Image (cartoon, helix red, strand yellow):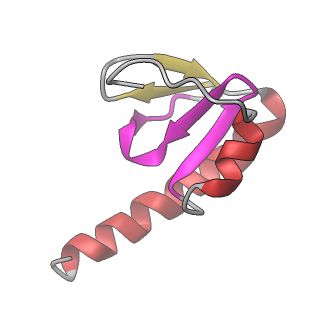
Amino acid sequence: MKTGILEASQSLSEMSQLLPAGNFCMPIRWALVSMREITSMPSDKLKLSDQTEIPISRGKREEIKNAFADFRWADMRRRMRGR
């Protein structure tokens, strides 16, 4: 996390189920990423606003690419509506 370490007794998969759908992704088994923090998506990694690069597992590339596109599209529509 940007503000430090979060210790939890749940797995990242379990935590991802508690978060708002479509706002987070799990590109690799050890990372849970907020879609708002993603600035770009080169073919095999996510680049975050703090310049961190997170690899995307081969099996999730298409899923993450589509989720990122959906998130950006919804975000753009919200901004156009002034929300």
Answer left or right for 17 relative to 33. Answer: right
Q: Quadrant of residue 82?
A: bottom left
Q: Magenta segment, which residues?
A: 23-42
Considering the whole magenta stretch, tell me its main secondary structure.
strand
Residue closer to the observer: 27 or 9: 9
Q: Residue at x 21, y 76 (%)?
A: 83
56 w.r.t. 83: above or below: above
82 relative to 20 in the view: left or right: left
From the top left corner, tell me how far across and down residue 12 is, in percent: 70, 35
Image quadrant of residue 30? top right
Q: Percent x, y for residue 16?
A: 66, 47
For this orientation, the residue located farthest to the bottom is 81
Does 40 appear in magenta? Answer: yes
Give left or right: position of 76 versus 20: left
| Nearer the observer, 24 or 1 | 1
Which of the pair 11/9 is nearer the observer? 9
> Which residue is at a point 50% across and 34% down the rendered structure image?
41
In the rendered image, residue 33, in percent from the top left (x then y), is placed at 53, 36
